[in-house]
Amino acid sequence: MAYDNLSPCAAEALRSVRQVKINGIMTGFSGLDESIAAVREENLTSESAIRASLMNRIRTSNYIPPRAEELYAAALMEEYHKTLLKSEEGKTRTE
């Protein structure tokens, strides 16, 4: 496997990287799925609160260029909403 020669920490970090298109460029985020799950558990209701929480979580393990912050936030919110839709579709199919 591709991760066999890496230390366990490095291999795990690579496994949790997810790519998102930002301004036409594929950009990798470490811990995106985990951050989305944590924000969902907060049960926030406003878009601005969700956005702020998601950006704060993503910043802990990813560099976000200050000049591109709005682009990153918009792309991450899009991924957040895609994840919610997939989750809802999964619930509908199992019911």
Image: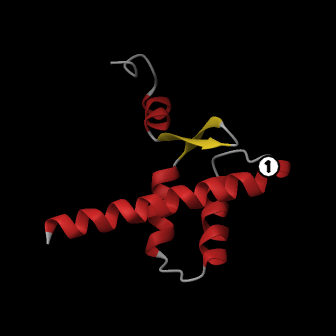
Q: Label 1: how many residues lie within 10 Å, few (<14), some (14-19) or many (20+)? A: few
Which residue is painted at 37% across and 19% down in the image? 4
Q: Nearer the viewer, residue 30 or 90?
A: 90
Depth check, front residue: 16 or 84: 84
Q: Viewer-proximal residue, 19 or 61?
A: 19
Q: Which residue of the protein is positioned furthest toward the right in this rendering?
A: 67
> How many discs appear?
1
Residue type at the position of mark 1 = Ala
Residue 61 position within the rendered picture, expressed as x and y whole percent measured from the top left = 63, 47
Residue 89 at what x, y percent from top left?
28, 64
Disc 1 on helix, strand or loop? helix
**Image check: 18 left or right of 21?**
left
The answer to whether 65 is drawn above or below residue 85 in the figure is: above
Residue 51: image quadrant is bottom right
Is 72 positioned to the left or the right of 45 in the image?
Answer: right
Q: Residue furthest left?
A: 95
Residue depicted at 47% across the width and 66% down the height: 38
* Residue 14 percent location from the top left of the image: 48, 33
Which residue does the image show at 60% across and 56% down from the upper left?
76
Q: Is residue 45 left or right of residue 65?
A: left
Q: Which residue is mark 1?
A: 68
- Tell me, what colour scheme is on the image? secondary structure
The correct choice, above or below, for 26 with respect to 41 in the image is: above
User: Looking at the image, which is closer to me, 35 or 46?
Assistant: 46
Q: Residue at x 67, y 62 (%)?
A: 56
Q: Position of residue 9 (x, y in %)?
A: 47, 34
Q: Is residue 48 above or below residue 20?
A: below
